[in-house]
Amino acid sequence: MSGIESFNPVTPQGLSIANLFLGVMVLSALIFLLVAGLLTYILMRYRGRPGDPDPPPVHGNRNLEIAWTVAPALILVALFILTLRTMNTVNATVPEALRIRVIGHQWWWEFHYPDRDVVTANEMHVPVGAPVLLEVEAADVIHSFWVPKLGWKKDAVPGRTNPMSVQFDQAGVYDGPCTEYCGLQHAWMRIRVVAEAPDQFEAWIEQQRRPAPERPASDRALRGQKLFLRNTCVNCHAVRGTAAAARIGPDLTHFGGRSTLGAGVALNTPENLRRWVRGVQGVKPGALMPNYAELPDDDLAALVEYLGGLK
Ligand code: CUA
């Protein structure tokens, strides 16, 4: 993940911006070279030498003045037209686009597919080659949604919905950060976009729509489920298919299928999940979740087995 990726985007919208940037850059470089070159030449060629007489006074040159007014005006008009073309490409919406609400929270991202009944966090799946409409919002403070491979970014502002039309033309996994300082864990508010073939995407959607199994596979996970439902976990988290339905923190219905936890702060392994539940404030200081430091070891193990099993 780096800013350079913005110049090599995988979306037609980003490509249009990158091309405009490149065009403006080349034009500016040419003008700079012309001006600096002429200036250098004139300084050398016409510099004063000892014994030179005073130069004759000059009172303007109408043709030159018209030329250096009209030429920049024409260049600006051309840039304006090119910019309008890029804006039209970037802002064009497609009515049948897949809608995804992208909601920035301190400090994680919620992805809600309103027409497909899917809610997930931090990892967004999209079909390759299909138009997608991101509706970028914020739940608390201003965040900014930036996946460099998209080619541009969009601010997430409380009380507003900022539309962002995208189309991923290449399959892949694209990472990005939040790029608007939003508090202590601004750095750990990572985004992962998985762009995959349409049938793979549909399979993912079908799997995400399913509620969690009513009865977990193992006895230990069943104990973990009871602990989860009995503890304050349910004040913030939802696991569809159980009584847990809070919308403050990330939806955990398919938590075990995500590759990281804490919006990218650690890989989603049982060991890291144990560290997270026991002492989240050591792993991600300031995260809006309390430590469960008093939890006995075997309870913690049961809870971790339950959550990790929610694939
Ligand atoms: Cu969210 Cu920075």
Image: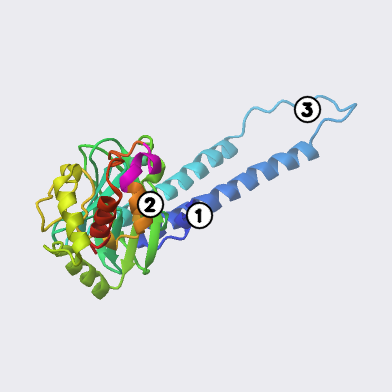
Some atom of ligand 1 lies within 8 Å of the CB belonging to the residue at label 2:
no
- Residue 169 percent across, percent down from the top left: 35, 68
Foreground residue among 242 and 58: 242
Tag 2–tag 3 contact (CB < 8 Å): no
Q: CA distance from mark 2 to mark 1?
A: 21 Å
Determine crowd level at label 2: few under 14, some 14-19, many 20+ residues with C-alpha closer than 10 A. Answer: many
- Which label sits on residue 264? 2
Tell me where residue 28 appears, x and y as whole percent.
55, 47
Q: Which mark is residue 107?
A: none
Query: Which mark is nearer the camera, 2 or 1?
Result: 2
* Three-letter code, disc 3: Pro
Q: Amino acid at mark 2?
A: Gly
Callout 1, which amino acid? Ile
| Disc on the earlier residue, 2 or 3 | 3
Q: Is residue 104 visible?
A: yes
User: What segment carries the magenta color?
Assistant: 277-285
Q: Is residue 14 magenta?
A: no
User: In this rendering, is residue 197 above or below 257?
Assistant: below
Q: Secondary structure at mark 3?
A: loop
SS label for mark 1:
helix
Q: Which residue is mark 1?
A: 4
Taking the image as shown, residue 75 lies to the left or right of residue 55, namely left
Task: Say which residue label 3 marks.
Answer: 55
Report if the CB atoms under discs 1 and 3 are less than 8 Å apart: no
Quadrant where the image shows the C terminus = bottom left
- Residue 180: percent from left, percent from top: 37, 39
Is the magenta region chiefly helix, strand or loop? helix
Tell me which label, 2 or 1, sits earlier in the chain: 1
| Residue at image location 44% in from the left, 48% down from the top | 79
